[in-house]
């Protein structure tokens, strides 16, 4: 029974994570345990446990009445998350560069090519899938699960806003694809001196886009979160 419950929690978690990070439910939207339970045909206990896991990751928050909603994110939180990503990505990429196999290098090249093709088609879903797999390869090769878990959770918090900010912005996807290509060159060549600056530039653009989006939303809605 415990194994079955754990499995149902994972199902609910993955479903809710997908909804949140792809904007099927927006920031601030309520998450009804009863409604989700009916939609997934899962009892409320696994749903609540999945929501609690998402709460720990910062994607879900509770209201004063203890109801769950999709978490908002402030500009301060974006800056803090990007500061952390800059440090941890530099570590992950540097560590991976020392262990990269020929097959892993080929896979990174393939994924950058996939990003380029998705960019040409303005296919944000395919681009995001390739980006996720790109980081999965490097996290696996680097071999530090604690850092990898932290990076994944941190990136999720800001990535969902970055995805929205790229709508209709071919140049941003193109620039980000070029940055990934430059990172791959530095990683494959074990050029540690080049990895840090490349990560700083890449995360800097992520920061600028998300902060710009949140600032625009604040001006339109009167939300003064900072």
Image: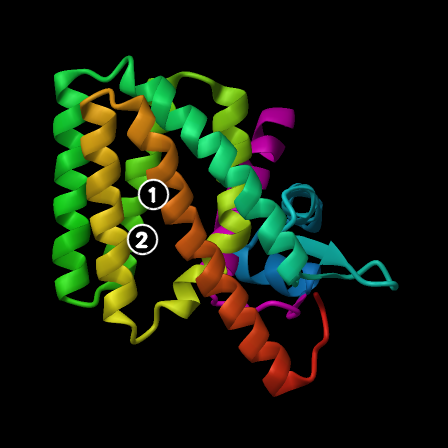
Q: Residue at x 12, y 46 (%)?
A: 113
Circles 1 and 2: CB atoms closer than 8 Å: yes
**In the image, which residues are magenta?**
1-30
Q: Residues within 10 Å of mark 1 (few under 14, many from 20)?
A: few
Q: Where residue 191 sits in the image (x, y, percent)?
A: 25, 23
Which sits in the foreground, 40 or 129? 129
* Quadrant in which the N terminus is drawn: top right
Q: How is the image coloured?
A: rainbow
Q: Is residue 59 above or below residue 34?
A: above
Q: Residue at x 41, y 26 (%)?
A: 92
| 180 sits to left or right of 49 | left
| 194 sits to left or right of 86 | left
Q: Is residue 16 visible?
A: no
Q: Where residue 5 sits in the image (x, y, percent)?
A: 62, 34
Q: Which residue is mark 1?
A: 132
| Quarter where residue 37 is shown | bottom right
Q: Main secondary structure of the magenta part?
A: helix
Q: Is residue 78 visible?
A: yes
Residue 166 magenta: no
Q: Residues within 10 Å of mark 2 (few under 14, many from 20)?
A: some
Cα separation between marks 1 and 2? 6 Å
Q: Residue at x 59, y 40 (%)?
A: 9
| Quarter where residue 66 is shown | bottom right
Q: Is residue 171 above or below residue 111?
A: below
Q: Where residue 154 sits in the image (x, y, percent)?
A: 55, 42
* Quadrant in which the C terminus is drawn: bottom right
Q: Residue at x 64, y 84 (%)?
A: 221
Q: Where residue 132 sits in the image (x, y, percent)?
A: 34, 43
């Amino acid at each position: 029974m415990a194994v079955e419950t754990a499995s149902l929690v994972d199902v609910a978690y993955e479903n809710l994570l997908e909804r949140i990070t792809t904007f099927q439910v927006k920031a601030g939207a309520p998450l009804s345990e009863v409604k989700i339970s009916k939609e997934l045909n899962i009892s409320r206990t696994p749903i609540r446990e999945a929501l609690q896991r998402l709460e720990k990751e910062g994607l879900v928050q509770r209201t004063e009445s203890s109801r769950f909603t999709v978490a908002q994110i402030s500009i301060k939180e974006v800056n803090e998350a990007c500061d952390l990503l800059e440090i941890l990505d530099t570590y992950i990429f540097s560590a991976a560069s020392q262990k990269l196999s020929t097959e892993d290098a080929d896979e990174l090249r393939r994924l950058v090519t996939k990003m380029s093709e998705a960019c040409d088609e303005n296919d944000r879903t395919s681009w995001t899938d390739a980006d996720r797999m790109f980081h999965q390869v490097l996290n696996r090769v680097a071999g530090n699960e604690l850092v990898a878990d932290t990076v994944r959770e941190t990136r999720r918090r800001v990535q969902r806003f970055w995805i929205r900010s790229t709508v209709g912005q071919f140049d941003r996807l193109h620039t980000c694809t070029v940055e990934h290509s430059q990172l791959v060159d530095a990683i494959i060549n074990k050029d540690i001196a080049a990895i840090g600056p490349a990560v700083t530039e890449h995360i800097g653009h992520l920061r600028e886009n998300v902060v710009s989006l949140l600032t625009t939303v604040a001006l339109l809605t009167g939300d003064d979160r900072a």
